[in-house]
Amino acid sequence: MLLTVKQVADLTGVTIKTLYHYHKIGLLEPGEVTDAGYRLYGKKELERLQHILFYRELDFPLEDIQKLLDEQNNRYSLLLEQKKLMEEKQDRLELILSTINETIHFEERGKTMEDQQMFKGLNKEQWQAQLKEHNDHLKEHYQYEIPTDEFDGEAVEESAREAHEFMSKMAFALKAGWSVDDERVKQLVTRHIHYINEQIMPLDAKGFVESAWFFITDEFHKKMLEDQQIGLSYYLYAAAVNLSD
Amino acid sequence: MLLTVKQVADLTGVTIKTLYHYHKIGLLEPGEVTDAGYRLYGKKELERLQHILFYRELDFPLEDIQKLLDEQNNRYSLLLEQKKLMEEKQDRLELILSTINETIHFEERGKTMEDQQMFKGLNKEQWQAQLKEHNDHLKEHYQYEIPTDEFDGEAVEESAREAHEFMSKMAFALKAGWSVDDERVKQLVTRHIHYINEQIMPLDAKGFVESAWFFITDEFHKKMLEDQQIGLSYYLYAAAVNLSD
DNA sequence: GATTGACTCTTACCTAAGGTAAGGGTCTAT
DNA sequence: ATAGACCCTTACCTTAGGTAAGAGTCAATC
C-alpha cells in the first residue's frame, strides 16, 4: 500500500523533485522513510497531496496551503471549500472567455473596444465586482434564475420580475411544444419587447433578435438560460427571428 | 489617448513593476517614452497586453508568449487560438471539479477511492486522455450513442441512419451546453451538410438555414425533433445560422 | 516661483516554486 | 555480481515578479 516517489509522481503528475521540495518545506511528509532513506507515501499522504494540488491549481502559495491544511484537518469541509473556490475560478474563466468572444466580435467588424471592456476578468482586484455587475445587469433585465417565491418582497424591481415571468413562460411554452409562430408565443414576445421599450431602453423586433443572438453566443448568458431549461436560449432566438420577419 | 503606467495598471490589474519587467525583457514596449523617461502606452500596446494576459492566464511562460506574439501578428487568429485554449482549460477545470465532487461523494459515505480517480484532471500529462474518458462517460449518461442493433436491418436507409446520428449528437451537444460556435458543433453541422450535399441534394450553409427553419415551423418535423430533446429544433436552427454567417 | 503630493525613474537585492546536474547509494533480476 | 532502474543529497540556476532606496517629474496650490 505504500508508494515510492516515482509511483506517486506517475500517479499524480507532480515531479519527484516537487515531492522532495514539499518534504523539505514540511508541506507533505512521507508516511514512512526506509533505512536507506527512501520516501514512501500511503493513503493519508495521497489525500493530503490531493488537497495540495487542488489549492495549487487555484494559485495558492505553498505556505498558505500548509497553514490551511494544518489548521483545518477536516477533509470534508476542505473539499467543500475547494469546490466553492473552483467554481469561482470557473466563473472567472467564463468571464474571460466572454471577454475574448467580445473582442473577436469587435475585431470581426473592425470596431474598437472600450479599454475597460478589454480586460474584464483579467483585473483580479476587480473581477469579483465585474462578475457581480455582469450578474446584476442580467438580473435587472433577465432575472429568470431566481425562484418565484423570492419575488414577493418589494425589494425586487419590477423589471426583474417581468423578465423572470417572461422567461418562465417561454420555458413553459418550449416544454409544451408551442410553435414560435403560435399566437400565444408571439404575444408573449411582443409584450416583452414592448415592456423593455417602455421601461428600459428603445428596442424593436430587429433589435430583439440581436439581443437574443447575444444570449446564445455569450457563454455567460447562455449558461444561465440553458440552466433554467435546456434549449431556452435557442427557442428565444427562433421566436425573435419569427417575429421580426 | 496615451496612458501612464499607473493608468494602465489600474485598468488592467497588472502592477507597475510588471510593466517595467515586460519592458525590460522586450515583451511589451511602451508606445512612447517622454523626455523624462515616462512610459506611455497606446491602444496598440493595450491590445498586445491583452494577449499577454490571456496567455499568462493559460500559464504560458513569458518567453513563449513573446515568440507567439512576434511571429503571429494577426490579432484575429491569435484570438481564435486563445479562445480554443481557454475552452480547453475550462474543460480541464470541469474535470477537476468533477473529481472534487466524486471525492466528496466518497467521503460522505466513508468509502475509499481508487488512487487514480483522486487525481483526474491534475495529472497534466494524462488529462487529455482522462477528458476523453469523461466525455465517453457523459455520452453513456445521455445515451447519445445510437443503439446500433436498431439499424442493422437493411430496411433502414443509410441516409436515415446518418440523420439520426446527426440529431442524436446535436441533442447531446445541446444537453452538454456546447455553444453553437463550438468547433465540435460546427464540424458536426458542416459534415452533415456535406453528407446531404453528396448523397441527397445540393445544399449549402444558407440552404441549411432554411431547412432548419422549416423544421421549426413545420409541426410534424418540429414535434419529431422536440420529442427527442426539448429545444433541439431551435438549437439546430441557431447552429445553422451561426455557420452561415 | 516655491512647495507639496502624487507619480515616475533606475538600481539593487529578495523570493517562490521548482528545474538541472553531479556524485553516489539501493534494489531486483538475471 | 553486475546491469539497469530507481533513489538519495547537495549545490547551483531560473522565472516572474516583489520590495526598497534614492532621485527626478508633474500639476496644482500657496
Image (cartoon, coloured by chain):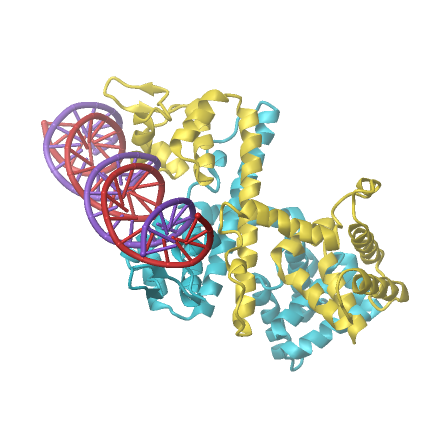
Chain colours: A yellow, B cyan, C purple, D red
Q: Position of residue B23 (x, y in %)?
A: 31, 57
Q: Is residue B178 visible?
A: no
* Mark count: 0
From this viewpoint, is residue A35 visible?
yes
Instruction: Name the residue nearer the viewer: B117 or B26.
Output: B26
Q: Residue at x 79, y 76 (%)?
A: A245
Compared with A102, A70 (above or below) is: above
- Of the 4 image quadrants, the one containing the N terminus of chain B is bottom left
Left or right of A38, for residue A61: right
The relative height of residue B129 versus residue C17 in the rendered view (above or below) is below
Q: Position of residue B150 (x, y in %)?
A: 70, 58
Farthest residue toward the bottom?
A: B202
Farthest residue, direction top: A35
Image quadrant where residue B245 sits: bottom right
> Residue A157's spot in the image, x, y percent?
79, 48
- Is residue B12 toward the left or the right of residue B16 in the image? right
Tell me the residue at 70%/49% (across/down). Answer: A227
Is residue B57 shown above or below B160?
Answer: above
Outermost residue, right direction?
Answer: A183
Q: Residue A176 is drawn in which quadrant?
A: bottom right
Q: Dividing the picture into quarters, in which one does residue B63 lie? A: bottom left
Q: Position of residue B81 (x, y in %)?
A: 46, 62
In the rendered view, does A139 fall on the left or right side of A173? left
- Between A112 and A205, the one lying in front of the other is A112
Along the line of sight, which residue is nearer the eye, B181 or B11? B11
Whether D15 is drawn above or below B208: the answer is above
